[in-house]
Image: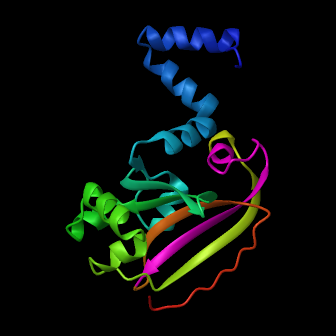
């Protein structure tokens, strides 16, 4: 485990002492790492960071539903998927996060759950690139940390309205075939 530097220890002491400016310094120093940590460990809600907000057409900081899943094939993990949906969109369809999670466990398909409330995914825009797996993704995919994986970032649309923003990580040794058809 990495030990904090003297500077980090002083900053932690200032935070413990209630100094508000120390929090700003912590965020400025570690913002990228903190955002990654918070997004991966948020129980089921997240706040829209700028990139996700832009993709979903919402304001930064707007509450989001976050669904993190490990997809398997014959019980072998083949993908880690993190889906973000605006909570306001779910609520406008009479769907709570708890109901969505229950429906997802029953149906197994986020698209089918959304279709049941009148949101039919009819298209998507995806970017695929190679990245190295962080510790959490590597563990979920049963890989060594820093192993190259494919990351698919996708925005799904229903009637030209962004509904889901997803990040999906897959081992780089799998064949990826993308076939998009609308309407769904």
Q: Residue furthest left?
A: 94
Residue at image position (62%, 57%) is 77
In x, y percent, where is residue 2? 71, 19
In terms of depth relative to the viewer, which is nearer, 136 or 128? 136
Tell whether 29 sits left or right of 70: right
> Is 21 part of what is drawn in magenta?
no
| 169 w.r.t. 115: above or below | above
Front residue of this view, candidates 166 and 71: 71
Residue 179, compared with residue 135, is above or below; it is: below
* Relative vertical location of residue 149 with respect to residue 182 in this rendering, above or below: above
Residue 181's spot in the image, x, y percent?
A: 54, 90
Asked if residue 147 is among those painted magenta in the image, a careful observer would answer yes
Establish if 24 lies above or below 115.
above
Picture quarter containing residue 98?
bottom left
Left or right of residue 175: residue 165: left
Image position, residue 112 (x, y; %): 37, 77
Residue pictured at 69% horizontal, 46% vertical:
138
Residue drawn where x is 41% and y is 48% of the image: 47
The percent position of residue 33, horizontal first and vertical second, equals 62, 37
Q: Residue at x 65, y 43 (%)?
A: 139
- In the image, taking residue 37 as reference, residue 16 lies left or right, namely left
Which image quarter is the C terminus in?
bottom left
Instruction: Count up the numbered dots.
Output: 0
- Which segment is the magenta one? 137-158
Quarter in which the N terminus is drawn? top right
Q: How is the image coloured?
A: rainbow
Which quarter of the picture shows residue 26?
A: top right
Left or right relative to 162: residue 137: right
Of 135 and 119, the residue lying toward us: 135
């Amino acid at each position: 485990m990495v030990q904090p530097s003297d500077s980090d220890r002083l900053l932690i002491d200032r935070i413990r002492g209630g100094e508000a400016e120390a929090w700003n310094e912590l965020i400025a120093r570690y913002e990228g790492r903190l955002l990654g940590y918070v997004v991966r460990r948020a129980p089921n809600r997240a706040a829209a960071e700028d990139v996700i907000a832009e993709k979903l057409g919402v304001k930064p900081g707007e509450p989001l539903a976050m669904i993190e899943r490990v997809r398997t094939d014959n019980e072998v993990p083949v993908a880690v998927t993190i889906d973000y949906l605006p909570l306001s969109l779910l609520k406008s369809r009479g769907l709570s996060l708890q109901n969505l999670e229950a429906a997802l466990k029953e149906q197994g398909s986020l698209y089918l759950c959304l279709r049941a409330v009148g949101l039919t995914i009819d298209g998507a825009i995806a970017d695929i690139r190679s990245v190295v797996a962080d510790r959490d993704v590597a563990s979920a995919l049963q890989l060594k940390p820093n192993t190259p994986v494919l990351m698919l970032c996708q925005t799904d649309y229903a009637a030209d309205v962004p509904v889901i923003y997803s990040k999906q990580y897959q081992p780089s040794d799998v064949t990826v075939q993308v076939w998009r058809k609308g309407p769904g």
